[in-house]
């Protein structure tokens, strides 16, 4: 039986790869995509998600547009103001315009109603700022207990990408992230930069994906190739000619949990610090008094991750 999931995305090149992986892997059943302000304005995130699904022949998967601004700080400077990141995504993905359209229902309503009516487990996978998820928690007191597992791309212990202290998704709506981390989810898995920076995809792997000749292989090579060029010039990784594809690692974890290695500990989000807004404070030495609330991935298996991408992108939609 396939595993049901909802992706909450700010598409974005790596979100698009995550969408394709979830939409094409035979053991996954992507029941909906919700969008949120982040890498680009939410309307572009929605358009990019629709383009991606159309391009791989999965326009049957519904897309719901979400919240356009951070919850508490509506004037916070996103979409992506960081000069270091321009070029990683662009505003519009480099594939043909969407022919399908978004659903009328709003993302937060879709999330609340889907979990309220669910008779099977649905994993929630947010790979953008956590605004929609925090809103669902605020609006439905039972939302948290209805979600069996939430797998978040965000945070960092040894890294920062948008500031020296913080990872973009958490920083972009730190108040929302703080509320999600503190909400008491049954199982919360965090896939931070510590893991994604170990799961680099090389230009050679991109060429292999393009050579598959499938829509997903071609699109993945294009999106990841763009990421590699941008990372090499603005944010070089330990290895040149390679880049992280953060969001897709969350989906790969659903296919094979051993693609990451997690530690169960307490994580909170800084919302006040003058220099550290959006930092994930990871209690690695059990110095705090709070019980573990997070399975935090410190490591990733690059070889397994790339193999999952390549095998899945060889497929075409039925
Ligand atoms: C995260 O930020 C976004 O730019 C990416 O899509 C990813 O979700 C990485 O920090
Ligand atoms: Ca993202």
Image: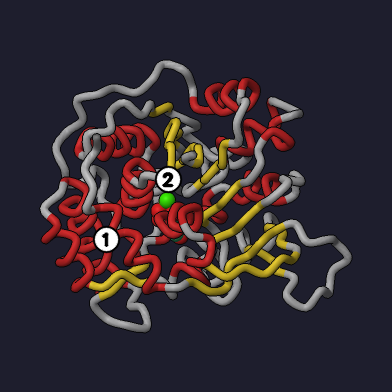
Give x and y (percent) for residue 144: 71, 37
Left or right of 232 in this view: 148: right
Q: Which residue is mark 1?
A: 310
Secondary element at tag 1:
helix
Which mark is in front, 2 or 1? 2
Give x and y (percent) for residue 101: 29, 22
Q: Nearer the viewer, residue 18 or 286?
A: 18
Secondary element at tag 2:
loop
Q: Nearer the viewer, residue 83 or 44?
A: 44
Image quadrant for the C terminus?
top left
**Mark 2 neighbour class, 10 Å CA radius: few under 14, some 14 to 19, many 20 or more:** some
Q: Is residue 135 positioned above or below 79 on the image?
A: above
**Mark 1 neighbour class, 10 Å CA radius: few under 14, some 14 to 19, many 20 or more:** many
Picture residue at 25% right of the left edge, 51% below the top: 90
Picture residue at 35% right of the left edge, 72% below the top: 200
Determine the CA span between mark 2 and mark 1.
15 Å
Give the label on residue 174, or none.
Answer: none
**In this rendering, does residue 81 appear at all?**
no
Q: Which residue is mark 2?
A: 27
Left or right of 169 in this view: 21: left
Which corner quadrant of the image does residue 143 belong to? Answer: top right
Q: Is residue 60 positioned above or below 307 on the image?
A: above
Which numbered disc, 2 or 1, marks the residue that appears first in the sequence?
Answer: 2
Disc 2, ligand 2: is the CB inside 8 Å? no
Give x and y (percent) for residue 131: 56, 39
Q: Nearer the viewer, residue 82 or 131?
A: 131
Which corner quadrant of the image does residue 111 belong to? Answer: top right
């Amino acid at each position: 039986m396939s595993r049901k999931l909802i992706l909450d995305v700010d598409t974005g090149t790596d979100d698009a790869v995550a969408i394709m992986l979830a939409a094409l892997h035979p053991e996954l059943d992507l029941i909906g995509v919700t969008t949120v302000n982040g890498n680009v304005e939410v309307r572009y995130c929605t358009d990019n998600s629709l383009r991606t699904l159309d391009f791989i022949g999965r326009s049957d998967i519904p897309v719901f547009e979400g919240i356009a601004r951070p919850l508490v700080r509506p004037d916070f400077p996103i979409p992506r103001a960081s000069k270091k990141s321009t070029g990683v995504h662009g505003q519009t993905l480099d594939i043909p315009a969407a022919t399908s359209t978004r659903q009328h229902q709003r993302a937060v309503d879709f999330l609340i109603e889907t979990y309220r009516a669910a008779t099977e487990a649905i994993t929630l996978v947010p790979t953008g700022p956590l605004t929609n998820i925090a809103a669902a928690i605020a609006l439905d007191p039972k939302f948290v207990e209805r979600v069996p597992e939430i797998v978040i791309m965000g945070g960092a212990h040894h890294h920062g990408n948008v500031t020296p202290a913080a990872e973009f998704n958490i920083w972009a709506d730190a108040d929302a992230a703080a509320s999600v981390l503190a909400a008491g989810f049954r199982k919360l898995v965090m896939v931070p930069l510590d893991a994604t920076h170990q799961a680099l995809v090389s230009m050679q792997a991109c060429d292999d994906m393009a050579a598959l000749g499938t829509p997903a292989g071609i699109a993945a090579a294009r999106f990841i190739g763009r990421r590699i060029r941008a990372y090499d010039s603005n944010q070089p990784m330990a290895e040149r000619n390679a880049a992280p594809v953060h969001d897709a690692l969350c989906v790969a974890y659903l296919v094979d949990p051993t693609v990451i290695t997690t530690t169960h500990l307490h994580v909170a989000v800084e919302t006040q610090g003058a220099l550290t807004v959006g930092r994930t404070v990871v209690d690695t030495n059990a110095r705090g008094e709070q019980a573990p609330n997070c399975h935090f991935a410190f490591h990733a298996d690059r070889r397994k991750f790339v193999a999952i991408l390549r095998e899945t992108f060889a497929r075409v939609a039925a």
